[in-house]
Image (cartoon, grey):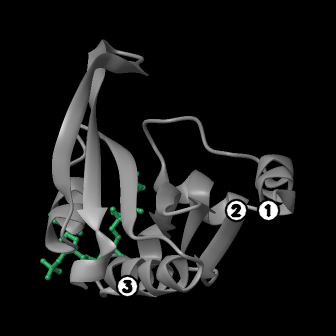
Amino acid sequence: MAATHAAAFTQARPWSAEEFAALLEQRFCHVEGDRDCFALFRVIADEAELLTIATHPHALRQGRAKACMSRWHERAQELGATYAVLEVAADNGPARALYAGCGYVQSGRRTGYYPRPDAAACDALMMTCNLSRG
Ligand SMILES: CC(C)(COP(=O)(O)OP(=O)(O)OC[C@H]1O[C@@H](n2cnc3c(N)ncnc32)[C@H](O)[C@@H]1OP(=O)(O)O)[C@@H](O)C(=O)NCCC(=O)NCCS
């Protein structure tokens, strides 16, 4: 997971293997996917939160992230979630298109949330999806 995350995330700091291991020890955290594409998410009561999703650069645009989103949504519903939330950088076009296609709508904005090394900080968009609508 750490290797795929590091290959996929070029703008943000990738998460280490130790950080993934610590998250996966938490009882509310779950993972769906495989070596090439995975989603890490948390379910607490009726709310599911996508913590991260990544597709390895050699496996992009093959429908893996879309399939992974469907799988983790299904699993979150089995665990009791009725809606899902996430945050995405406003300048992350591929992720925003992915989430829009999966039924997410914008619910808020955090101005200047993501620092950028050679540019102005980027806003975070908060998004939500009603899981019971499929
Ligand atoms: C976002 C990401 C997970 C998409 O992975 P992927 O496996 O290539 O996505 P899919 O092939 O399943 O594409 C599903 C949809 O996402 C959108 N999409 C994916 N890549 C896109 C791109 N480069 N440009 C525009 N839309 C894109 C499209 O709507 C696509 O549907 P379509 O193929 O029918 O047009 C991948 O680009 C990635 O790992 N990015 C870096 C990490 C990241 O930004 N994660 C999200 C943080 S919030």
Residue at (36, 64) in percent of width and height: 83
Residue 69: give x, y in percent of width and height: 39, 77
Quarter of image, res 114: top left
The residue tagged 2 is 29
Foreground of the two, 22 or 44: 44
Amino acid type, callout 2: Cys
Q: Amino acid at mark 1?
A: Leu
**Label 2 with label 1: CB-CB less than 8 Å:** yes
Q: Position of residue 3 (x, y in %)?
A: 68, 61
Cβ–Cβ below 8 Å for labels 1 and 3? Answer: no
Residue nearest the viewer, comparing 98 with 125: 125
Q: Residues within 10 Å of mark 2 (few under 14, many from 20)?
A: some
Q: Is residue 112 above or below residue 36?
A: above
| Residues at discs 3 and 2 in contact (Cβ within 8 Å) | no
- Of residues 82 and 38, which is closer to you in this image? 82
Along the polypeptide, which appears first: circle 1 or circle 3?
Answer: 1
- Sequence-wise, the earlier of marks 2 and 1 is 1
Left or right: residue 100 compared with residue 26: left
Q: CA distance from mark 2 to mark 1?
A: 6 Å
Mark 1 lies on residue? 24
CA–CA distance in space, label 3 to label 2: 17 Å
Could you tell me which quadrant the C terminus lies in? bottom left
- Ligand 1 contact, mark 2 (Cβ < 8 Å): no
Q: Secondary structure at mark 1?
A: helix
Classify the position of the N terminus by image quarter: bottom right
> Which residue is labeled 3 in the image?
70
